[in-house]
Image (cartoon, helix red, strand yellow):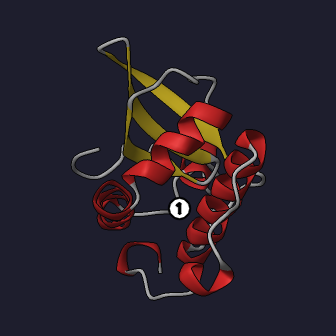
Amino acid sequence: MTGQPHRPASHGAGQPSDADAAQPFDADTVRAVCGHMNADHADDSLLICRALGGRPNATRARATGLDADGMDFAVAVDGIEVPVRIPFARRISERAEIRREVVRMHEQACDAFGLPPRSAERNSRSRPGLK
């Protein structure tokens, strides 16, 4: 995702449009989160996309964007990159909620494959992109 997300004008007196509500995160936040996921959690992203994104044969996953409702990835399947959207459990609006949702997705993906999730201690470390 590059530049600022497209945001239509608000509707009514101070009422945000649906598009505004769907993208509460500015471009810098989206870039930071995606960069962090791609640099530090590529294996986790792949696991999430395999288990929750309906791409069990994916060989690589790259975070490409997010909004209030979910996270977008580009995954490699049979040498072809395809988009995958993983919805959040609920609409989020705060940056700290992103991390909680990604951890939840990871735990759900681990459960789907019968893998142990990361320990709470490891998940509590400082992570600049997901703060």
User: Would you place residue 27 above or below residue 59 in this image?
Assistant: below
User: Would you place residue 76 above or below residue 69 in this image?
Assistant: above
Q: Position of residue 52 (x, y in %)?
A: 67, 36
Q: Amino acid at mark 1?
A: Pro
Asked whether residue 9 is in view, the answer is: no
Q: Position of residue 111 (x, y in %)?
A: 77, 49
Can you name the residue that lies furthest to the front here? Answer: 115
Q: Residue at label 1?
A: 24
Asked whether residue 110 is in view, the answer is: yes
Q: Position of residue 107 (x, y in %)?
A: 71, 58
At x 46% / y 73%, what residue is drawn? 130
At x 49% / y 87%, what residue is drawn? 125
Please state which of residues 101 and 40 is positioned toward the viewer in this rendering: 40
Instruction: Determine the secondary structure under disc 1.
Output: loop
Q: Quadrant of residue 53?
A: top right
Q: Is disc 1 surrounded by few (<14), some (14 to 19) or many (20+) residues within 10 Å? A: some
